[in-house]
Amino acid sequence: MSYPEIRYDGESGEVTAWMRPASTPADLTSKAGTKFGYLATGADTGGDFGLYRLDMLPRAGGASDHFHRTITESFFILSGTMKLFNGDKWVDAREGDFLHVPPGGRHGFRNESDEPASMLLLFTPGAPREAYFEGLKTVSGLSDQERLEFFLQHDNHFVD
């Protein structure tokens, strides 16, 4: 494995870094009360990655067994206990635990505990996951066909 091709060939570097303060309010709150922080979207990173923070209430549920065809997804537990599906079984993941899922890898997550939990989600490349997260609020009102189309549009393939 080697470094990627050069993407910047200037001599002295540029002032292009940006910061999102911890005090920034959540970008989205789900019906279950999960707060989504869009730390770095695919649009922000030129498609390199998308990084999101999820702050979940106790027993907030989550995503069932599914896979993606075009993106990787990685989980890093910041606090609390999350159930993560590693493609084989549901495991308890605690602060500092990490799970990486390549394209095609089955996975899921949920907070079944009586305590809040927080985690980071990293998607590579940086697909527009914001539209997926925001669309989840309306998915229950869709017909079966519309729901299927929504999930396929956002590269979510659920395993029944």
Image (tube, helix red, strand yellow):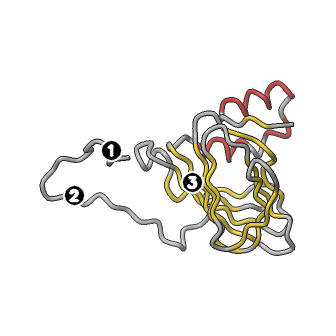
User: Of callouts 2 and 1, which one flags the residue occurring earlier in the amino acid sequence?
Assistant: 1
Can you tell which mark lies on residue 122?
A: 3
Q: Which of labels 2 and 3 is toward the front?
A: 3
Residue 144 coordinates in the image, percent (x, y): 86, 28
Local SS, label 2:
loop
What x and y, as percent, mark residue 111?
80, 63
| Among the two numbered marks 1 and 3 on one chain, the one whose residue lies closer to the N terminus | 1
Q: Residue at x 58, y 45 (%)?
A: 72
Real-space CA distance between mark 2 and mark 1, rounded to the nearest whole angstrom: 19 Å
Amino acid type at mark 3: Leu
According to the picture, the residue beneath numbered tag 2 turns out to be 14
Which percent across, then down, holds residue 1? 38, 46
As drawn, the residue found furthest toward the top would be 145
Q: Amino acid at mark 2?
A: Glu
Residue tagged 1: 4
The mark closer to the camera, 1 or 3, is: 1
- Name the image quarter holding residue 15: bottom left
